[in-house]
Image (cartoon, rainbow, N blue to C red):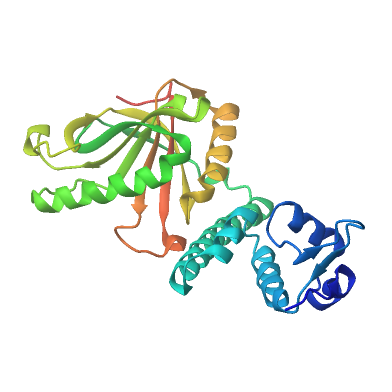
């Protein structure tokens, strides 16, 4: 069809500004059907209106220009749908991440002082099975979920008897340098030799410690809020000592998939002069 639509007419039809159309021409996303070599005027055809509408909607969904090109040049509907579905999946993941961040910010703004709930506990050494690994902080939560699920499976498979809630030990380097040793464990009844090494699951002794503890309620995505409150309490009222920070998962994914029901004790190692031996 003869290119008879000026850029102004095409802009009004497609709701794409002249500036946007010029940009799409420059990046090769939507080129005019004809460009007058003398005047530089650009002309479009009515057949290009639908293409422009598709581009507009994909860009409204924040699809990168390169991916939009891929959709427009894809070989068949199946290939186009695959590209679009992949982008929608990314959007949903980003939306979920945004919702989590919003919920976390609301919790921060609405948090109440609850340091009066800090408790002290002398934790003796305990036989356990665990998984230890150097992890990046950004990967810590997904690593924790996988490792803890693996531990629960091994405990059941070997017929071991848990002696308490599962827990975790996290080296200071993980927080200070975004990479460090992380350990998840399940205490078991009996000596360490009761359990067998299977893959990365090993028997070991959880070290004893004097702890100040504060319970975190809900998802671990904003557990830093409870760490902050507990850390401030310890800095004011206790003598902090070197050693991994500790978590006990009183209610976790093995109990319920509803993260709002999770309860996690955060333990900070301290020196207690009033300890009764």
Out of 214 and 76, give the one closest to the viewer.
76
For residue 67, above or below residue 198: below
Q: How many marks?
A: 0
Coordinates of residue 266 in the picture (x, y in percent): 44, 41
User: Which quarter of the image is occupied by the N terminus?
Assistant: bottom right
Q: Residue sitting at 27 percent across and 51 percent down? A: 149
User: Which residue is located at x 65 percent, y 60 percent?
Assistant: 62
Q: Residue furthest front?
A: 38
In which quadrant of the rendered view does residue 241 lie? Answer: top left
Q: Is residue 37 shown left or right of residue 63?
A: right
* Residue 182, picture quadrant: top left
**Residue 180: x and y, percent?**
41, 27
> Is residue 135 something that shows in the picture?
yes
Which corner quadrant of the image does residue 23 belong to? bottom right
Name the quadrant of the C terminus. Answer: top left
Furthest residue toward right: 39
Can residue 99 be seen?
Answer: no
- Residue drawn at x 13%, y 53% as measured from the top left: 156
**Residue 25 placement, left or right of 100:** right
Q: Nearer the viewer, residue 209 or 100?
A: 100
Q: Is residue 67 left or right of residue 81?
A: right
The image shows residue 237, relative to residue 230, as above or below, that is above
Give me the residue at 74% from left, 67% from top. 33
Question: In x, y percent, where is residue 30?
Answer: 71, 62
| Nearer to me, 222 or 37 | 37
Image coords of residue 152 (percent x, y) = 21, 51
């Amino acid at each position: 069809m003869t290119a008879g639509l000026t850029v102004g007419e095409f802009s009004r039809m497609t709701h794409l500004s002249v500036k946007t159309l010029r940009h799409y021409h420059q990046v090769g996303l939507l080129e005019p059907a004809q460009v007058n070599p003398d005047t530089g005027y650009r002309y479009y055809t009515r057949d290009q209106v639908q293409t422009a509408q598709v581009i507009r909607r994909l860009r409204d969904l924040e699809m990168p220009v390169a991916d939009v090109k891929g959709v427009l040049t894809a070989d068949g509907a199946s290939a186009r749908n695959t590209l679009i579905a992949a982008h929608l999946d990314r959007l949903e993941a980003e939306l979920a991440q945004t919702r989590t961040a919003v919920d976390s910010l609301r919790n921060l703004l609405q948090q109440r002082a609850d340091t009066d709930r800090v408790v002290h506990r002398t934790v003796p050494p305990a036989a356990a099975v665990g998984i230890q690994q150097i992890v990046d902080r950004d990967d810590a939560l997904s690593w924790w979920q996988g490792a803890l699920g693996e531990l629960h499976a091994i405990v059941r498979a070997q017929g071991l008897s848990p002696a308490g809630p599962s827990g975790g030990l996290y080296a200071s380097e993980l927080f200070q340098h975004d990479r460090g040793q992380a350990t998840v464990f399940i205490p078991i009844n009996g000596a360490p030799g009761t359990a067998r090494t299977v893959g990365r699951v090993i028997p070991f002794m959880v070290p004893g410690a004097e702890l100040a503890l504060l319970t975190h309620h809900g998802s671990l995505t904003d557990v830093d809020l409870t760490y902050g409150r507990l850390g401030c309490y310890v800095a004011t009222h206790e003598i902090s000592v070197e050693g991994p920070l500790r978590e006990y998962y009183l209610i976790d994914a093995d109990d319920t998939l509803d993260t709002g029901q999770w309860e996690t004790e955060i333990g900070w190692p301290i020196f207690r002069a009033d300890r009764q031996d």
